[in-house]
Image: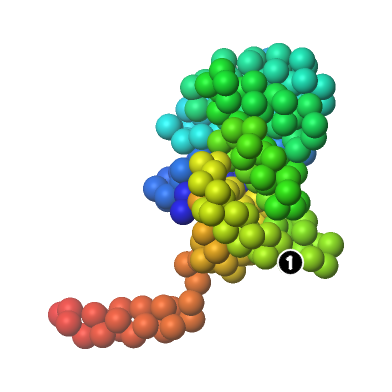
Amino acid sequence: MKFFIDTANLAQIKEAHDLGILDGVTTNPSLMAKEGIKGDEAIRNHYKTICELVDGGDVSAEVFSTDFESIVAEGKILAAIHPNIVVKVPMIKDGIKALKWFSDNSIKTNCTLVFSAGQAILAAKAGANYVSPFIGRIDDSNWDGMELIGQIAQIYALQGFKTEILAASIRSSLHIVRAAELGANVCTCPLDPILGLLKHPLTDIGLAKFLDDAKKMQH
Ligand code: G3P
């Protein structure tokens, strides 16, 4: 499973990249706004900096438009920023049409705001490279986000769809483990749930004992 970080914060991206396990970055307008990025030029420069930081990994950049012509025009500008840009397109009717256009024109895409298996089928049919089911937000609504990951994985395997399942809106380390178990190709989340994977009390106890015994072997 690939690890993407879901942030537009350069320090977090750098920290995750320095761990050596980062495969890419996802952003969205809320995450970009949180970093205070304003204006077309600043947006393009920020995406370029992220692409250079992650050094070869896919970087999702979301369009703001909602009609076909504007989504395509915006997506072309985003894709021209760097070869690793993946154009993030919302799950709407014109979005589906644009996903197909991008697929026919060799521009990589991520279909976002996916909350059902039916939407995931449409994204795959349109040729999206990634589909982003929002696990945490489904859980927030008292439904089971993980059930959707399993359902999409089963459908894509049965039907031979090539679209990669990008488990998004991940809120905890356990979400990452469950997504991996259920066949998600990618998980995207902030740095904390990734670092949370490190934690186990027996590791801490075991290390303390090893370090203690190591002292006994020194003069
Ligand atoms: O980038 C899409 C998704 O990961 C958003 O997550 O935590 O805002 O639901 P969240």
Q: Amino acid at mark 1?
A: Asp
Residue at 64% x, 32% y is: 126
Residue 32, how many percent across, how many down? 71, 34
Compared to residue 22, the image places residue 62 above or below, namely above
Residue at 71% x, 37% y is: 28
Going by the picture, which residue comes out furthest to the front?
159
Q: Quadrant of the C terminus?
A: bottom left
Q: Is residue 187 at all visible to an observer of this figure?
A: no
Residue at 75% x, 51% y is: 115
Residue 4, how many percent across, how many down? 54, 46
Residue at 56% x, 18% y is: 105
Label 1 crowd (10 A; few <14 / some 14-19 / many >=20): some
Count of marks overlaid on the render = 1
Which of the pair 34/194 is nearer the observer? 194
Image quadrant of residue 103?
Answer: top right
Q: Is residue 203 at all visible to an observer of this figure?
A: yes
The response on whether ligand 1 sits within 8 Å of label 1 is: no
List the residue tagged with mark 1: 144
Compared to residue 175, the image places residue 162 above or below, namely above
